[in-house]
Image: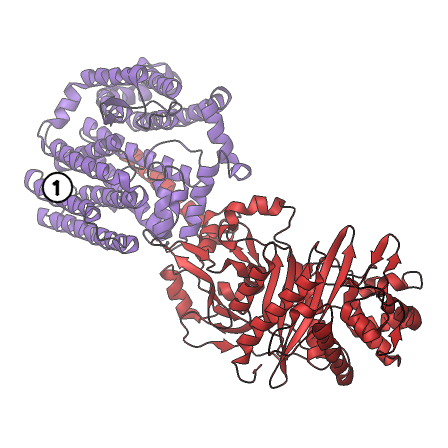
Chain colours: A purple, B red
Amino acid sequence: MALHESLPVRPPAPSRLQAAERSLLLVSSVFLAVNFLALAIIRNSSQPDHWLHLIVWGLCAFVGYRSLKRWLPGHDPFIFPIAMFLTGWGLLAIDRLAPAFAERQTLWLVISTATLLLVACLPHALRWLRMYRYSLLLIGLLLLIGTIILGRNPSGLSGAPQLWLGVGPLHFQPSEALKIILVAFLASYLAEQYPAMRAEELSSGRGRLFFSPRIFGPVLLMWGICIVILIWQRDLGTAILFFMVFLILLYIASGSTILLLSGMALIVIAGFAGYQLFNVVQLRIDIWMNPWPEADGRAYQIVQSLLAFAAGGIFGQGVGQGAPTFIPVVHSDFIFAALGEEWGLLGILTLIVCLAVLITRGLRIAVIQQSQPFRALLSIGLSMLIAVQSLMIMAGVLKLIPLTGVTLPFVSYGGSSLVMTFIMAGLLLRLSASEGSPS
Amino acid sequence: MTLTREINRLLIATLVAFGIVALAASYWAIVGPDTLLQRADNPRLIMAEAAIRRGIIQDRNERLLADTLIGPNGQVERYYPQPEVSSLVGYSSLRYGVGGAEAMFNTILRGDDLSRGFFSELVDSLLHRPQRGSDIRLTLDLTVQQIAVQAFEDQAGAAVVLAVPSGEVLSLVSLPTFNPNTLDDEWEQLIASAEEPFFNRALQGSYQPGGMLATPLMVAAMLTGESITDPIPNATNPIRIDDLELTCALRLPRLELPLRDAYAFGCPRPFAQVAERIGSQVLEETLARFHFNAPVTIEGFAARPEDQTLSDITIDDATLVESALGQGQLTVTPLQMAVMAAAIVNDGNAPRPYTLIATRAPDAETWQPVVTTRSTIPFTTEGTARQLQDLMRNAVANGAALNAARPEIDIGGHAALAYSGDETQSWFIGFATLPGKRGIAVAVVLENRDDPGLAADIGGTLLEAAHQTLRALPQQSS
């Protein structure tokens, strides 16, 4: 079954696209309005600042919708509504779980929407990404080195990972920006190498493929970056995310399944090595294998997370009526569990379907754009960044895989994460609208 | 050369991964409620427990004994406006559980016994309404209870006041006790305290009966045809049991007294002689008729942990005298003594003591009376009971129980001493009568206090207070 058979590749008329986008945004705003109202009733407060979040969200959605309609005709009608829906839901959840953080997140939403529109509507964004890839990579690596040297944690705890760069009260996580830069770099690099790689595969056979510098070079670079992130920053999640997305892009470009499988094997081997070498890895794996004996100690968070899903059941407890705040720092990595408790399995399935639709739309763009390898690979890379990160945290919170500290895209609290995710959505929108035009 | 094959595979793999996550979420959401949520460390269980709105507790005159305060965020606090009722009402603490009436009627107060139909329960659960329990009204009289606690001052001991013929517990005092409002803060000290404030002396205290056994001995003497009016020489002389010297309840010169006055003054020597005359067999039968083998308890309240009742011990010739004088192995509870007094004032048949008058379901307007038929407990014949009443009136008029007398109230009583180890206990049992064959029975014990007069005084005060409460009422219905 080929993708272009199951999904209509030829886009419908622009007016129908806009109608779909508008309907989706309206449904989202109704969902959010009902839930904010329910939250206000539960809190028994008529304070206007809770409604502020909804109003700001509505303005962002409206301005975004109008601007995209005007400046980016023919864009994908699902990406922006899903991004807004998930972000609004996250805003609601943050307001419910950690009201002190909600205002800052609302501010980040404004910044993110502006950035998305900028990226989506600027005519040369894609070309710049491609042209200045080495400069961008250099900046990215410098930021990474800067974090290693100057990094800190906004919470000020000495033991916490120092993943942020800060100026005064503003904090920024460079590894978030590095995600996009690396994907753009790889997409552009592989787009150039891709005909040669495919040809080499045909001419020279699989045996020599691994030793080709075309493959060897980027593998070594990525591996190095991941190791640096893992060792110096103890950021297991980001390291795995980078490597997975890189492997997927390499697989798409080369078409070699062996390459993909050996890459996966490398991750498993790295896992074993990490278990021996790093306490943090050992801890995560031990807790994943059997959290129950340490339910009140090291495994408290994951056990409370599973309890939240159980407490939510199928229909959920209702917004503000569950007890997900027993999970430490629930508004960040574990927001998925909070949604499970208050919106139940139905809410969780809705969230998963939204993400799946978003990824499917992203990959659909790649199919449409496959005549231009850079665009196709960039769409795939951006989609996979969102997909792999979502799957990692969702599966981790559900005890399917060891926990890796990454955020749930769009939903979790976190400014840099939200801005970068919106930039990805903006790039995907841009890619979806520029069918056939030269890059 | 296209990417379609790879992208298709990628899409399928991604969707499968999302599907697996969805399945895992479904597993925990569907299986979890019956397994995970039952874990003892599930904080939601404690939250639900803490949110339960227990019913209030009232005294017999609708005065509030225990209240449920609801804070601005729905947090629930149990509040006791009258902490002096703790001996009967007990406590309810999230951390330390329940005690007393709070424990006895826990199911009612929590609302576990209510079934409100499928739809109301569904609505309550959808709206996360906390579980609510029924209100209860106890037989306790707050005024009598407060007067009792005041009368004891700092004296350790216990008192029980029963209404006759209903068997309502009007007051139940065990001192020292605890303040249920500050229980959570003071728990550690209370538990460690040598005064054992959680030990309910009225219901669980195992006291030497001492001279209290003179009443059944009196019955035995009367039934064996002994004269109670013939003077007995040296009746006031002390009597020695091992190292213990037993004296009259009042200090008296060497006198000859008839048995009825020996009873009134709490003199042990003539009763030792009665015991020797009737022998261990008859003594045991007499005590058994007074239910010393199976003492009456209040159902549901903590009873004595190890029953040192008559059925556990044997009385032979060697232990005859010490047993008859209440200095043997047999011990009694204050409740048991109050029931004995109730049997006497009720012409030989004791009512079964109880504490619950009525319940009121949440939101209900009206109280549902708790109707239970309770058989009386036969102690002795009407004639003997009448004779005992007169003996006890005599003890108040002329004897050691003089302090129990109150103007214009028909009061009878019996004060006596008991010894355990180095300590002396002062006992008083008594009754007051009311029109319509009604009455009040009381038992008082003072720990480590050689003052039967004080015990009689407290007993008189309690009888007077209860008399005032009950006098106003018409014929008791129960």
Q: Quadrant of the N terminus of chain A?
A: top left
The percent coordinates of residue A279 (x first, y second) are 48, 23
Amino acid type shown at disc 1: Gly
Of A10 and B242, the residue lying toward us: B242
Image quarter of residue B396 = bottom right
- The correct choice, above or below, for A150 with respect to B473 in the image is above
Which residue is pictured at 13% across the width and 24% down the height?
A127
**Residue A353 at least partly seen:** yes
Image coordinates of residue A77 in percent, x first then y, are: 16, 45
- Residue B211: x, y in percent? 78, 65
Local SS, label 1? helix
Residue A194 locus on image (x, y percent): 25, 22
Identify the residue under disc 1. Answer: A64
User: Along the horizontal axis of the image, is A365 left or right of B249?
Assistant: left
Q: Does B382 appear above or below A437?
A: below
Front one among B310 and B94: B310
Q: Residue at x 21, y 17 (%)?
A: A139
Query: In the rendered image, which quarter contains the C terminus of chain A?
Result: top left
Residue A44 appears left or right of A308 = left
Q: Residue furthest left?
A: A70
B129 or B59, nearer to the observer: B59
Between A72 and B330, the residue placed more toward the observer is: B330
